[in-house]
Amino acid sequence: MDCETLITYLSDYIDNNLDEDLAAEAEEHLRTCHNCRVVLDSTQQAILLYRTQGKQRIPMQRRSRLFRQLEEALAGQDCE
Amino acid sequence: MTDEQALIAALRRRDKNALAEIFDRYSDRIYRLALSVLSDEQAADGVVQDTFMTLIERIDTFEGRSRLGTWLYRVAYNNALSRLRSLKPQLDLDGFDEDDVPIPANLVDWQTTPEELLGSAEAMAEVSRAVETLNPALRAVFLLRDVEELSTQETADALGISPGAVKVRLHRARLALREALAGYFSERLGM
């Protein structure tokens, strides 16, 4: 496997979506190619950072307001 | 009856606790999806509101062919896209070439970055800024796969696209974020 092919399969490799043969070829390439190893490690690190950063929640006050409006809508339907 | 079917049945009886439970489970996830598309908190609140209003209005006819979470995501995503089209009519949502996968250029090894810099507010802001530059169609896939940790098929169902498109978009988004962060960390570390 060459570098270009490894990069093409990088996401599938990270997600364990490669069949056994391709995964073995990727492993073999990664053992010997420093640059591809760096790309793999830094992509995994980038995903972890995004997972941490991306977990925003609706701020409490706005969340309560949104829920109150929905509760009223539900109660309104009940009276119909 | 599954837990989800029980909740749907209770909501059909206009049970307030069922609404609270469903809202608790899904509101933040829907908010994040809307925010990923719209990059606007107020508009994202509007999507959450519209999505749950649609659920309340349609609960009597909800057929349960898809899971509730998938159905809510789908409603929310379409709502967010239609808001985006009216907010930014010039934006091309397909403005990326699915076949054109970026080649990693910055090969600096930033694995040695100290924990305090990796987890710093500045680094997190950089992650946010980098994700922000992606096409909204890529951001939605990136969020559902790598933050919400949905499977490829679940993401495809939620967004109404093919599993193949999910894979391609995710790959592009990951490599783009990696490239941006490689640039940022190598500069911060003077490498």
Image: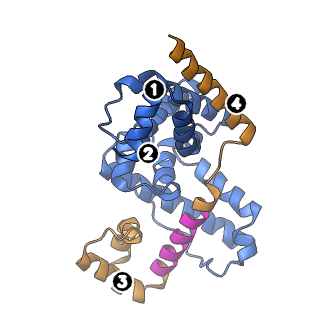
Residue annotated with mark 4: A65
Tell me whether the residue at label 2 lies in contact with that at label 3, contact meaning CB atoms closer than 8 angstroms.
no
Q: Is residue B45 magenta?
A: no
Q: Is residue A45 magenta?
A: yes
In the figure, the blue chain has which letter? B
Assign a secondary structure to mark 3. helix
The residue that appears at 52% across and 17% down in the rendered structure is: A78
Residue annotated with mark 3: A27
What numbered label is drawn on residue B13?
1
In the figure, the orange chain has which letter? A
**Neighbourhood count class around disc 4 (C-alpha, 10 Å): few under 14, some 14–19, many 20 upward:** few
Dividing the picture into quadrants, the one containing residue A63 is: top right
Residue type at tag 3: Glu
Assign a secondary structure to mark 1. loop
Residue type at tag 2: Phe
What numbered label is drawn on residue B120?
none
How much space separates mark 4 and mark 3, taking CA atoms?
Answer: 52 Å
Magenta part of the chain = A36-49
